[in-house]
Image (tube, grey):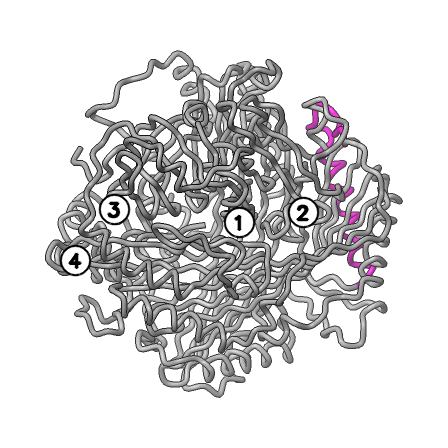
Amino acid sequence: MGLGTAGIVLPSLPAFSRTVSPEQLLEPGLDVAIKKRLADAAMNAAKSKGATYTDVRIGRYLNQYVITREDKVQNIVNTESYGVGVRVIADGCWGFAAVVDAKSEAETAKAAETAVAIARANAKLMKEPVQLAPQKGFGEVSWKAPIKRNAFEVPIKEKVDLLLGVNDAALKNGANFVNSVLFMVNEQKYFASTDGTYADQDIHRIWPIFDVTAIDPKTGKFETRNALSAPMGMGYEYLQSNPADKVTGITTRYNKGYDMLEDVTAAAKQARAKHKAKSVEAGKYDLVLDPSHLWLTIHESVGHPLELDRVLGYEANFAGTSFATLDKWKSKDFNYGSKQVNLIADKTQVGSLGAVGYDDEGVKTQKWDLVRNGTLVNYQAIRDQAHIINEDHSQGCCYADSWSSVQFQRMANVSLEAGKTPLSVANMIKDVKKGIYIIGDGSFSIDQQRYNFQFGGQLFYEIKDGQIVGMLKDVAYQSNTQEFWNSCVQVCDASDYRLGGSFFDGKGQPPQSSAVSHGSSTTRFNGVNVINTARKI
Amino acid sequence: MVYGWLTRELLIRQSTANQKPNTRTPTPMAIILTEAEAKALLTKVLSYSKADSCEVNLSGAERGNIRYARNEVSTSGALANQLLGVQSAFGKKVGTATITEFDDASLEKVVRRSEELAQLAPENSEYMGVLAPQQYLKASGFFDSIASLTPDKRADAVAKSLKLTRDANLIGAGFMDDRNGYEAMMNSKGLFAYYPSTNVNFSLTVRTDDGKGSGYVARGYNDFTKLDTAAATRIALLKAQGSAQARAIEPGKYTVILEPTAAAVLLENIFFNMDARSADEGRSYFSKTGGSPGWATKLWMSALQFIPTRPMLSYPHRPGRGMDDRRKKRCGLRKVWLRTWPIRASGRRSREKKPFPLPTM
């Protein structure tokens, strides 16, 4: 993801995308019986060439992006990408081939034969054969995201009217500039493998965002405020907010429904107010972190370092490695955080970006512990990694961003469990003597081992003797992963639990994108080092 | 894992008895078109246009890669792709559509689609129209050494790197990616441009077994014969060995010397923050009070020099983008990049009313 200070940076579209009309986004894909025939043709062809395992992914990826700024519609993008990817094991080595627009059994069979040829060619470079964790077949199954309103069924005009209304509200309430975008994605994925699974899945994601800028012409300085929305595994119903979805307080935040108009109105006023906010005095503070902020810290300092491929060095040349090495896990007493810290991976969470029924190698999705009572207990692993951590099964977090991309280990939804003891945000703040309440995610920096880091935010409020006394600016906190999570002293209860997430999380060479959610309740961290980002160096 | 093997013939839709009646007619065509082939195709596409102005962009590329980690190849693959994009304009109403199929019916359909989108679009006051014919500098970014690259040659290059890391008891993780492609464009004002190019990029991270020492190296060329993976690997080896006992330093002010790779990565990271629109609007590090570029821009102008058509760069000037190479007259990045962006609609003053090509750093 990328929200720059001066506008929204748009991601690239999936491979081989072609523009289509909005109506074509609603046309049905291939019938499931045809997909099964295409998959069987590939699996039979691979077997006849000597493959010991084959999986086939038939994918139709639909995207709609509506992009505006101020009073203009900058672009409306409707794309479709369809194709088939075949992965095999032959001579103990992986092979992969893909074919665009394949609708015949001859085409998928040929892709399978190519995949086997590649596997055989590369087998001589392997030290040991691939060890695949066993997986039972599930037969013909399906999974569909429980959406209430398919975003593609909503007329473009309704979406444009919403965004231009949002922009108008921003400009009327103090913003000089405003960008707003609606990202909508539908992945129609069919998976088949020689284990005996034929899984047909329908996945939906949505992300409404904006950024507003307020300029002070006297000083030439500018302040921004980005949306407090979350990318969700939901349909257009996410934009139908009701009072139960709102978390009121110093500013309104949102749960399973988002009021974009209300948020941008507040954002414009807050961007203007930041000009008069007190610049923070550097030092140690107790931090009260809202879920709209904490998701990013979880993503970077927990989700990434506990990806097993990073731990093992497979991402050393690109995404990075991990400080959370195997020896720390094997010790069974590595204090990742304080006793209050329980971090879980979950590919089943309803409404989350990572929720699916089956992952991209046919494993039924699940939920498991990563950190329990502060101790590192597990990683995120897929079928060919499970044996390395003495597991007899995959955790079901394998993903490819396209039919043309090979599937590999990607981050599950990684979240901080809500506190078991009843605790509201107001009661948490009441006990803080010198603190900062941070809402919304901002810029950040973290090293390639995911250890030393710095995080900013959108809104900062000074807490003195249990009271919020005013707005701050120029705030960023610095820490390292272990020190930070060990400074966690309180987590609010489940009534405050909300999701944040990344719609475009990058990893791999060639790079692939994935979407992942991170949940938490408001959480307190004591004695964290805060710097003033406006200081002169 | 072995990744992404996609052969040319797999990309091209094939005629088979199993195709359903509504499946589009297959149109076998090479991924890399010659200049004459590209010109003929673009001429045909433009003949379907009914818009006030029309621009058609065509590209094709064949890519190959090898990824390795923990001292063995982990993934490898090849990918071929071709894309045609049509931008139609009625006045300042602009629409764009893309397609991956090149039969006549599909070509006409994509033109109609772009025209429909243009008619539906609101006026874009920043639209600057299509370019008139241009005079281009000669440049050669195409080398047969990459165009004829085979999986075996790719593997040999990586094997040289792997041998060095294995022999040194260090751990290598690297990626080599090569591309052979072309870009072509034609518009309704008579501009035609065609540019074939090749490039290869190699990057490697070498680490000590305990992870305390690490060295990175990256190289990029248009000509595969210039890529010496062994020499590059030796640099990463030295860095890894040399940094294993590195001592931590306190924060403070130091003189820092950046090797070219580090300086280039730094440039990449600031590249997208150097747009003129944000500077004009007063919401950029490069703004000064009331808008327009400030001191930081001048600093960069003096620090950065643009070298046109430098042969070692992965992308020397690209006439395929359609703009003439006025970069030869420019010596500062500011004068290229900050002037590239179009005028904002609200009427803020603009320093530049003509389009400029993107710079090469």
**Does residue A122 show up magenta in the picture?**
yes
Kindly identify which residue carries mark 4.
A216
Classify mark 4: helix, strand or loop: strand
Alpha carbons under labels 4 and 2: distance apart: 54 Å
Q: CA distance from mark 4 to mark 1?
A: 47 Å
Q: Position of residue A372 (x, y in %)?
A: 59, 26
Give the alpha-carbon distance from disc 4 to disc 3, as whole Å: 17 Å
**Separation of residues labelled 2 and 3 (CA atoms):** 54 Å
Find the magenta span and give its range. A104-132
Name the image quarter holding residue A345. top right
State whether discs 2 and 3 lie on one chain: no
User: Are dots 4 and 3 on a single chain?
Assistant: yes
In the shown orientation, is residue A97 left or right of residue B169?
right
Task: Please tell me which of labels 1 and 2 falls first in the chain.
Answer: 2
Determine which residue is flagged by label 1. Answer: B179
Near-viewer residue (B5 or B192)? B5
Magenta part mainly helix, strand or loop?
Answer: helix
Q: Residue at x 49, y 79 (%)?
A: B117
Q: Chain of mark 3?
A: A
The disc label shown at residue B5, or none: 2
Identify the mark nearer the N-term, 4 or 3.
4
Circle nearer the viewer, 4 or 2: 4
